Image: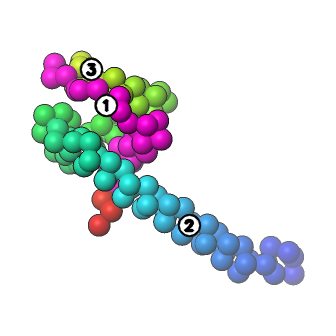
Amino acid sequence: MNFLAQHLKYIFLATALLLCSLNSRASTDDAKASALAKQNACLGCHAVDKKIVGPSLQAIAKKYTNDPNATAFLKNKILKGGSGSWGVVPMPANAKLSDADVSLLVGWILRGAPSTN
């Protein structure tokens, strides 16, 4: 028997543990990002799945799915605000957020703002 066949169950177990770890981290990040969105009034204008004043978070994720500059663009949009991407209604600046918080929010938004329920 070759090495791979002899150690297949160990390789499978290690892979499963890695995937569980990554999923757990994503869930934790999603919960933190959702809480940040609530604390900073993001959800007053943006719902996860429907337009309110601004576009839904899922619509934002869909629009920027294949855009390699999406993360930088959305971080800038959150920090500086502005208008024109989705119409004439301006988005207020959120300059008080740390870079880590903005990165967490943008990652969550680009994943479609998954629920933590």
Query: Which residue occupies 25% across, 49% down?
Result: 38
Closer to the chain start, of discs 2 and 1, is: 2
Q: Label 2: how many residues lie within 10 Å, few (<14), some (14-19) or many (20+)?
A: few
Q: Which residue is mark 3?
A: 82
Q: Please say which color scheme the image uses.
A: rainbow
Query: Which residue occupies 35% across, 33% down?
Result: 96
Q: Determine whether label 3 and label 1 are within 8 Å by CB.
A: no
Amino acid tagged 2: Ser
Q: Label 1: how many residues lie within 10 Å, few (<14), some (14-19) or many (20+)?
A: some
Q: Which residues make up the magenta segment?
A: 88-114
Q: Which residue is mark 2?
A: 21
Q: Quadrant of residue 93?
A: top left
Residue at the extreme front: 96
Residue 65 drawn above or below residue 83: below
Q: Which residue is mark 1?
A: 94
Q: CA distance from mark 2 to mark 3?
A: 37 Å
Relative placement, left or right, of 60 versus 20 is left
Residue 3 drawn above or below residue 55: below
Could you say whether the residue bearing mark 2 is in a helix, strand or loop?
helix
